[in-house]
């Protein structure tokens, strides 16, 4: 006896929309049990996690702010993952983008006169650096057939150590008592705030525009079609005359550029200087976000907001209900597992087949 | 003390507005319990730095049960800490301890938005009207450890697991070396930088590497007990860090440099309750009870007596770890004979003393 997964011939659109929603409900129910086990009322915990953060203007801004880099990076990654290419190194591309853009900010510190060009130059430098950094695993894969999973991942550590070296050495603030940080950027090198209270900055708009642009490119352009075809059926794509190598370079450039842009947006937005650590792991969380959003840009936007919501709700739960941080992390993992699991059931029948294990059912 | 208010200009200008706001809000706070929030960079279960800070939170809750309510956020990444700090301020905290250097700018920014809330930032150097800074003279403990290690080492090589090359860590390495040189002028130190405050895996790897290179006594400026456990496993000796880690390595721990924030945290909360809190800078050492050495273990009685005497000497002020002559790596004089290093020099230390087998990035 064995279990076989047989692809459904027709995917139900209702099921496609319902499956992540049901997965979310299931995650909340299981999370509720865990909360009850810790001696806290699940109802109260639900309010703290999911309602309170949505009921204050400040926390709504914080959710948008936290979701922006995740959505931006994950949208770029969607291009890679759709084409069956595995860029695991967005964290490194994020860091390099923040470093390169931040470098412009440090170099122009104290510039007088016309300064309007500085911020665009920083954003451009960040994007370019992220894309260039992603070219390393892409070229290694195209030329030498090296696994992009390993190279892109290992380059994360290289990027982090490079940033670390730069803020301890060449980019260190000379008036900073040898502490590892650069000078604070000038006003002209900071993203403007959108609302009073110095919280919501223009990076949120950049992320939103990127999601819209990616939606259009994936759905309505030849390039978007190429990405989808190569991912779904590499052989068919080759017959159609699409070049594997060119596509690999293109999607790595896109995902690296998006991560680099997210990096400089974070540095020029929230942080305002270079320091040894500029990312709380956005590049890795974005992988989860990309799959939670099922590799579609609008889905990714929603997934990024959900992850941001649980993170911020989780902080509220730590403060108000004394629930541990681990619970929030466990819940986020649970959510991903359930969404992916629900997707399997939305896409496949499960069938019991007599006989030994063979299994080429998923092809 | 640390007389280095580089924020002074800004503070003066802000001063008036902040004072008005504080006067207006003063009495409203007194009616309720004072909420005291703590932000930790690591997990409270690291059995090191964050754990030790959390002990002071518990001590505070025990000391003033009717007057304060405490809460904390753990594992807060430095790059994403502003929101966490602001969240505490928004949920009604009147006093907030931000316990890692990397929280400095976010703390100052949130403090500007919440002039009524008092902030206490550990190990930083920027203050404002409602942000105080505090730290401990860890280097005093390091000097005592250095003397113990210099006496007990058979191989003549000591291993040092370091986190980040900030002055606090560098001055610790120097003090340890000067202590060791005081008893054995030919002693050698090998340093491994792990670029983390808490990562048991990396710390254990570093410990193995150092032991393999011939070090027979380890010390660390990271927070987990992993290096101690590694030393215990290989029958070598080591020092604990931040909290008493004896139970993890009863045969290896010589002593541990323990941070005791209890007295400070309770005093600051009382000051807020009494309305006497003012922005200030505190840098306490062995004398103030902020740096505490765990009981001396796994050493002969004469070494124990020597360690006790050194500790007492530092507390009395008879011994200063950076008493001249102190030479830099290149042989130039950092502190002249008959003088001691002034605090600003220790606080900005970015050079090694002579004899350390490592290079600092400049």
Image: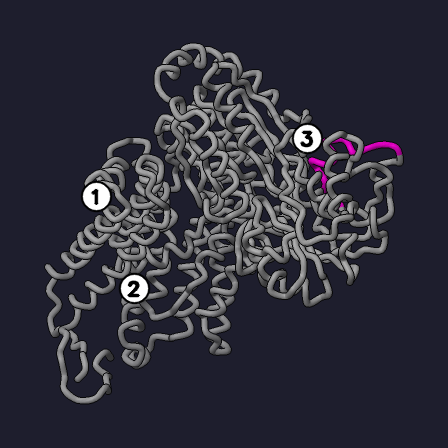
Give the farthest residue toward the bottom: A355
Near-viewer residue (B35 or B319): B319
Question: Does the stretch in magenta take in B345?
Answer: yes
Q: Main secondary structure of the magenta part?
A: loop
Seen from the viewer's position, the closer of residues A112 and B321 is B321
Outermost residue toward the front? B301
* Magenta segment: B338-351
Residue at 23 percent across and 59 percent down: it is A339
State whether discs 3 and 1 lie on one chain: no
Residue B338 screen position, x and y as percent: 88, 33
> On the image, numbered disc 3 is attached to which residue?
B287
| Most foreground residue, B7 or A120 | B7
In the picture of the structure, the residue carrying the numbered disc 2 is A224
The CA distance from mark 3 to mark 2 is 69 Å
At x 34%, y 75%, the residue is: A242
- Residue B75: x and y in percent read 44, 45
Residue B72, quarter of the rendered image: top left
Q: Is residue A214 above or below residue B136?
A: below
Contact, mark 3 vs mark 2 (Cβ under 8 Å): no
Viewer-nearest of discs 3 and 1: 3
Residue A216 visible, this orientation: no
> Magenta segment: does it hold B149?
no
Residue designated by label 1: A42
Residue A337 occupies quadrant:
bottom left
Specify the subunit that label 3 lies on: B
A30 left or right of B342 in image = left
Q: Is residue A213 left or right of residue B234?
A: left
The Cα–Cα distance between marks 3 and 1, rounded to whole angstroms, is 49 Å
CA neighbours of label 3 inside 10 A, class few (<14), some (14 to 19), many (20+): some
| Helix, strand or loop under label 2 | helix
* Image quarter hosting the N terminus of chain B: top right
């Amino acid at each position: 006896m064995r279990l076989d997964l047989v692809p459904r011939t027709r995917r139900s659109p209702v099921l496609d929309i319902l499956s992540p929603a049901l997965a979310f409900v299931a995650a909340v129910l299981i999370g509720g049990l865990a909360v009850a086990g810790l001696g806290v009322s699940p109802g109260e915990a639900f309010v703290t996690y999911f309602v309170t953060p949505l009921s204050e203007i400040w926390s709504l801004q914080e959710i948008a702010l936290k979701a922006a880099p995740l959505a931006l990076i994950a949208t770029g990654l969607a291009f890679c993952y759709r084409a069956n290419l595995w860029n695991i190194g967005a964290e490194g591309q994020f860091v390099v983008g923040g470093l390169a853009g931040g470098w412009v900010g440090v170099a122009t510190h104290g510039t007088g006169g016309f300064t309007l060009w500085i911020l665009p130059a920083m954003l451009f430098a960040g994007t370019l650096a992220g894309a260039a950094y992603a070219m390393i695993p892409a070229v290694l894969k195209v030329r030498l057939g090296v696994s992009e999973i390993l190279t892109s991942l290992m380059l994360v550590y290289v990027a982090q150590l490079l940033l670390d070296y730069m803020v301890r050495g060449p980019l260190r603030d000379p008036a900073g008592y040898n502490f590892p940080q650069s000078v604070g950027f000038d006003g002209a090198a900071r993203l403007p705030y959108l609302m009073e209270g110095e919280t919501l900055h223009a990076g949120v708009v950049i992320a939103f525009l990127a999601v819209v642009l990616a939606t259009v490119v994936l759905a309505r352009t030849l390039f978007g079609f190429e990405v989808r075809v190569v991912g779904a059926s590499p052989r068919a794509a080759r017959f159609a005359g699409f070049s594997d190598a060119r596509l690999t370079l293109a999607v790595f450039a896109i995902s690296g550029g998006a991560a680099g842009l997210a990096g400089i947006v974070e540095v020029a937005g929230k942080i305002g200087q270079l320091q040894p650590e500029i990312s709380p792991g956005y590049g890795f969380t974005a992988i989860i976000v990309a799959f939670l959003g099922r590799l579609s840009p609008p889905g990714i936007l929603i997934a990024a907001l959900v992850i941001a919501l649980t993170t911020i709700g989780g902080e509220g739960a730590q403060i108000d209900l004394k629930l541990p941080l681990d619970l929030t992390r466990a819940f986020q993992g649970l959510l991903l597992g359930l969404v992916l699991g629900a997707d399997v059931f939305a896409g496949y029948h499960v069938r019991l087949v007599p006989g030994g294990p063979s299994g080429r059912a998923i092809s | 003390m640390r007389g280095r208010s580089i924020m002074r200009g800004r503070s003066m200008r802000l001063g008036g507005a902040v004072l008005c706001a504080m006067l207006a809000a003063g009495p409203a706070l007194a009616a309720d319990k004072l909420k005291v929030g703590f932000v930790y960079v690591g997990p409270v279960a690291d059995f090191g730095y964050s754990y030790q800070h959390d002990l002071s939170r518990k001590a505070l809750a025990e000391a003033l049960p009717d007057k304060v309510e405490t809460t904390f956020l753990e594992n807060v990444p430095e790059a994403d800490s502003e929101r966490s700090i602001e969240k505490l301020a928004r949920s009604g905290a009147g006093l907030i301890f931000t316990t890692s250097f990397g929280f400095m700018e976010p703390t100052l920014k949130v403090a500007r938005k919440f002039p009524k809330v008092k902030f206490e930032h550990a190990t930083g150097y920027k203050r404002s009207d409602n942000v105080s800074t505090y730290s401990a003279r860890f280097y005093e403990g390091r000097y005592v450890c250095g003397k113990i290690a210099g006496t007990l080492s058979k191989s003549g090589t000591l291993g040092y697991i370091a986190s980040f090359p900030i002055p606090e860590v560098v001055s610790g390495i120097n003090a340890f070396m000067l202590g060791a040189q005081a008893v054995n002028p030919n002693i050698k130190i090998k340093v491994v930088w792990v670029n983390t405050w808490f990562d048991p895996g990396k710390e254990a790897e570093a410990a193995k590497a150092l032991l393999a290179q011939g070090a027979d006594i380890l010390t660390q400026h990271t927070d987990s007990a992993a290096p101690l456990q590694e030393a215990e496993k290989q029958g070598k000796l080591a020092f604990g860090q931040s909290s008493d880690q004896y139970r993890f390595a009863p045969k290896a721990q010589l002593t541990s440099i323990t941070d005791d924030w209890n007295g400070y945290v309770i005093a600051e909360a009382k000051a807020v309750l009494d309305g006497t809190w003012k922005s200030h800078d505190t840098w306490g050492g062995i004398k103030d009870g902020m740096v505490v050495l765990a009981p001396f273990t796994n050493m002969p009685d004469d070494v124990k007596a020597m360690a006790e005497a050194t500790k007492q000497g530092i507390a009395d002020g008879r011994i200063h770890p950076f008493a001249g002559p102190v030479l830099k790596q290149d042989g130039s004089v950092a502190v002249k004979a008959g003088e001691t290093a002034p605090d600003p020099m220790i606080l900005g230390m970015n050079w090694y003393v002579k004899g350390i087998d490592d290079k600092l990035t400049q």
